[in-house]
Image: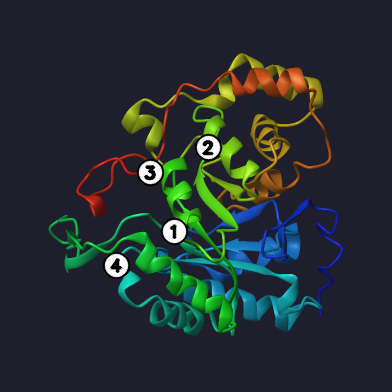
Amino acid sequence: MQSASALGQDQPYKTLSSGYKMPLIGLGTDKIFDSDILANAVIQVGYRTLDTASRYQNEHVVGEAIQKIISNTELKRDDLFVVTKVWQDEVEDVEAACKRSLDRLKLDYVDLYLLHWPLYTRLVEPANPETNTPAKYERINIPVHKVWPQLEALVEKGLVRSIGVSNFGVQSLWDLQSYAKIIPAVNEIEINPLYAQTDLVKYCLANNILPIAYTPIARAATTEKKRGTDNVLETDIVQACSKKYQKSPVQVVLNWGISRGYGIIPKSANIDRQRENFQIYDFKMEQSDLDEITALNRGQKICYRDEFVFFHNIFA
């Protein structure tokens, strides 16, 4: 049996409004379909948070990884923090969607269950890879106040420990808070130096909603080439901080994120990059350096228009 408990035991955590502790550095799993990659990230690197979603179509892979971790190390289920999400076409019966996710994950509960988007559609026609035709959806008029109580019920039934949202802006959060019995514990959104989301981050933290940053390095596969996105890793301030703190540019940018008080979920299938992304909490940058990195903000999004919502930009 491998010893994995010592790895990452000093990693930073935050106590959510639900009372449960969440590691601030998680592993994004979208497009990863090899359970060994995920298991090794926990066993050999130290990750404890695995972030998946119904939409990613890999919950069963995450479940296989969890079984390998528990079978081959002294780690137990409660040592892991598992996040998954209900997709926009599953909101008519959230409990059924959650139970499908639990079956795929081979779990009795998830630590955090998120409402993936603040709007909802119904699948009309699946995507056709042979003709390169995207899936077709139709709008369904279900307000969030009809969906959120379904997530709250999952907490009461013990199927999930904490609930939260993703891609919600201030207006959506403000409205949700007006009727929610359980305030969302987190808001998973795009945050990086080119899209710093200062106002939204400030609002979330002020209301005890932990922001969780996806695309925290401001890059995604082929995005820079497709949309001409700037490479934040090559900016003068990030390069200067890299030399100053003897850390890679990636580690500088990720440290900037957790230094602002929120969680991050960088994604990589490469164990060396996973290790680089994880080993970011053993140094502290000066506030002036953090402020200069924040000043890189130019409202430049990685995640933009999406076929699921008729190519409108709905991302917070």
Residue at mark 3 to residue at mark 1: CA–CA distance: 20 Å
Amino acid identity at mark 2: Leu
Q: Furthest residue to the front?
A: 178
Give left or right: position of 68 versus 302.
Answer: right
Q: Furthest residue to the top?
A: 236
**Is 88 or 231 nearer to us in this picture?**
88
Front of the two marks 1 and 2: 2
Query: What residue is rendered at 44% in x and 59% in y?
Result: 31
Q: Secondary structure at mark 3?
A: loop
Q: Earlier in the sequence, mark 1 or mark 2?
A: 1
Query: What residue is rendered at 25% in x and 54% in y?
Result: 308
**Is 27 or 291 nearer to us in this picture?**
291
Mark 4 highlights which residue?
89
Give left or right: position of 138 versus 294.
Answer: left
* Within-10-Å neighbours for mark 3: few <14, some 14–19, many 20+: some
Q: Earlier in the sequence, mark 2 or mark 4?
A: 4
Query: What residue is rendered at 63% in x and 81% in y?
Result: 67
Mark 1 highlights which residue?
31
